[in-house]
Image (tube, grey):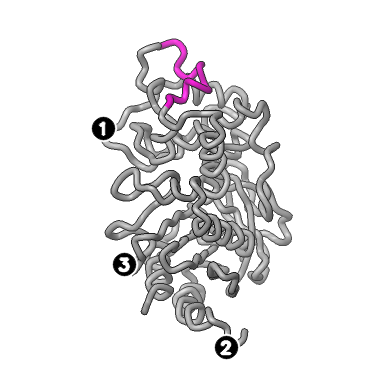
Amino acid sequence: MSAGHPLTPLLERAFEPVEAAVQAARIPGAVFGIVDRGGARLVRATGCAQTVPERRAMREDTWFDLASLTKVIFTTPRILAYARDGVIDLDAPLVSVLPDLRQYDPTAWERKVTFRECLGHQTPFPAVEPIYTYGRDPELLRAFVLQREWRRLTNPVYSDINFILLGLAMERLEGKRLRDFDSGPGFAFSAAPEVAAATEDCTWRHRILCGEVHDDNCSALEGAGHAGLFGTADAVLDFAKSLLEKDAAGDPLVALMRTPLSENRTHGWERPYPQWHGGTLASPGTIGHTGFTGTALWVDFDRGRAWTLLTNRIHPTRHFDSGIFPLRQAVCDLVNQV
């Protein structure tokens, strides 16, 4: 790494807590990368991509299960593109594309939920549901999602159900499964085990997951709009750099990704609010998102840079306090330190 590289000071200081977390055995390994609008980029890896049943070193080009980064890298841009092209109206209900949603109850509240509300997590859906426990037939599970009388919350929460439904709408519009979609440059819906970061020792699939999707519902549905994308740090940074470039050119889709829908959310993304994962020093022009497996991405349009922290913090189990939340905050504050 060149000492004269413009991003070296940022990476050096932000990487310190990442290495400390690995040394303390809080996370097996991580890849951290940063890019600016001009194309300057640095990526660094530490620790292990896998520790059970064998140890493999983490590499800068290790593939990660990106988990909920799928929402912002894969699903959100496509839904916004449908709206731009006049295929859907963001303020129309999902039944404009999914007329069979709660079809046996014309007055059901689920039939009034709109695309924009799903993008901004402004619906009454519960945060998550163990859909995979209702069977292994992906077509039956799709019907279950559409016909279920969902528990209605009083206040909106971040919900996977929103993006599962957006994914079903995408499938209906294109006439094919999500796993048959173009995953985007540098991304895929699986990865070769020998180049992937391992995730969990799954209690119902009875194996260490490596290169196959960790999210239980996405696995059972065989593709979903809320999870399932795989990629490297470079692929994530390429995507982020494209957002920075498009924003500078006045792209209307990126403008929507930046447009607030609530105190803490935009179309698809999170925006800075007290105690968010992006730390205390984020500029107002920052958006970000995290993934359950230990992944995260932030894009700062005001400062013209983006950074990603990809970890395998749930390997070999999610039932452990990895300290990922304060780690993310520390990394972001060090990136944004003046």
Tell me which secondary structure the magenta stretch mostly adopts: loop
Foreground tag (1 vs 2) = 2
- Residue 312 in the image, given as x and y percentages of width and height: 55, 61
Numbered disc 3: secondary structure: loop
In this rendered view, identify the residue nearer to me: 200 or 218.
Answer: 218
Residue positioned most to the front: 249
In this rendering, position of residue 279 left or right of residue 166: left
Q: Is residue 32 visible?
A: no
The numbered dot on residue 280 is 3
Determine if the magenta segment contains residue 93.
yes
In this rendered view, identify the residue nearer to me: 330 or 244.
Answer: 244
- Residue 235 in the image, given as x and y percentages of width and height: 63, 59
The numbered dot on residue 4 is 2
Spatial CA distance of label 3 from label 1 is 29 Å
* Kind of residue at disc 3: Thr
- Sequence-wise, the earlier of marks 1 and 2 is 2
Determine if the magenta segment contains residue 158.
no
The residue that disc 1 covers is 154
- Sequence-wise, the earlier of marks 3 and 1 is 1
> Which residue is rendered at x = 36% and y = 66% of the image?
282
- Where, by quadrant of the figure, is residue 198 drawn? bottom right
